[in-house]
Image (tube, grey):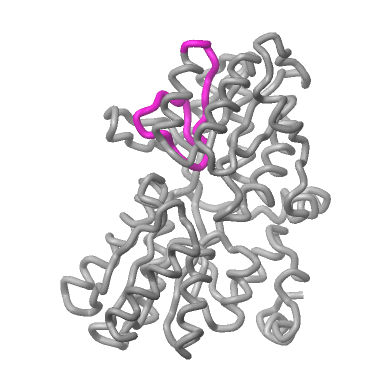
Amino acid sequence: MRSRTLTLLAATVSAGLVLTACGANSNSGGTGDSSASGSASAPAGGGANGKVGVILPETATSARWEAFDKPMLQAALQSQGFTADIQNAQGDNQKFSTLADGFISQGVKVLIIAPSDPAVGAAIEAKAKTAGIPVIDYDRPSLGGSADYYVSFDNEKVGELQAQGMADALKDKKGAAVVQIEGAPTDNNATLFGDGHDKVLKPLYASGALTLVQKQPINDWDPQVGGTTFEQIFTRVGGKVDGVVAANDELAGAVITVLKKNGLNGKVPVTGQDATAAGLQAILRGDQLLTIFKPIKEEADNTAKLAAALAKGDKAAADAIATGTLHDPKNNRDLKSVLLNPTLIEVNDIKTVIQQGYVKASDVCTGDLAAKCTAAGIS
């Protein structure tokens, strides 16, 4: 997969949008589930370019969908002249399908989906295609589907950054024992993260520089399951774990809880992803080695620009935006894609995330962390 150069957002994100994005779980323009599951006669109008339907996957395993994606997509789509109806399926595949059926019945100009299950996404895309509605896969691809475009990050690169950070942390400990706590096996992004991990770590396992204890995917990205699974692995090997590659900050937090119970937090490096407030706090405390920052505003902005081109039937304009490709092995096609570049965040980089407005300093620099924030240049 191709890496993209990350353009920092500080110059492009207005203060108002920043504060809105960090205001967490407001509806930010959504109109409730009934709007998406209404009758076929429901109007698709609204903004100058009409109505766009957006379905996000859940809120249980990551705060990003409501805190960042929803308000940033709302603002980006409105800036392109759309009325955006943004719903969340809350991890329920049937609800996801019902919301999609409602949007298709309404005749939305474009359908934007981030399904938890790619098979559900593929089925929805087949219906949308029959109805003549273009579809953008947002953040997660629907393998085997027929989406027109895909917008996400270079997710194999995410895994490479996590794994290289771990390799660097353990470089002086030959044969160090590593556990990989991966994301949901049904999520292609998790597969790509794992591919990135393997690209860096497999040669190190083969050479004996590191030792793989276990690589374990976690269904539904469930942190509770992740913590229990890690504790079982930890117990089985008698606590002989030197590093944990955890696929996101929530799984990292669950791992750190287990390490803390055993007096090993801060001694065993743990990776994460998404640059959540909790993840950044764990890095400041020394309990977490790193996280991965993915500038969601860029993802939302590119999605909105693609939607505008699709609504106008301007394929050339859309192709000029989506200059990357993602290979879909299920139907052996290359899906035209926008693949944005992720950024490694360690303790001295936390200020970058805060300066760009994705997390507020007041949410990170609490209590005993105030002094650590000052030391890390965070104000």
Q: Nearer the viewer, residue 92 or 105?
A: 92
- Kindly identify the residue that appears in the image at 18 percent across and 78 percent down: 208
Can you give x and y, in whole percent of width and height, for residue 318 in the image?
53, 25
- Kindly identify the residue that appears in the image at 57 percent across and 30 percent down: 112
Can you give x and y, in whole percent of width and height, for residue 287 in the image?
53, 81
- Kindly identify the residue that appears in the image at 73 percent across and 13 percent down: 43
Q: Is residue 102 above or below residue 143?
A: above
- Kindly identify the residue that appears in the image at 47 percent across and 29 percent down: 149
Quarter of the view holding residue 363: bottom right
Q: Nearer the viewer, residue 312 or 222?
A: 222
Q: Which stretch did the figure color magenta?
A: 130-150
Can you give x and y, in whole percent of width and height, for residue 133 in the image?
55, 16
Position of the C terminus, as image quadrant, is: bottom right
**Main SS class of the magenta portion in the image:** loop
Can you give x and y, in whole percent of width and height, for residue 196 in the image?
34, 57
Image position of 49 (left or right of 326): right
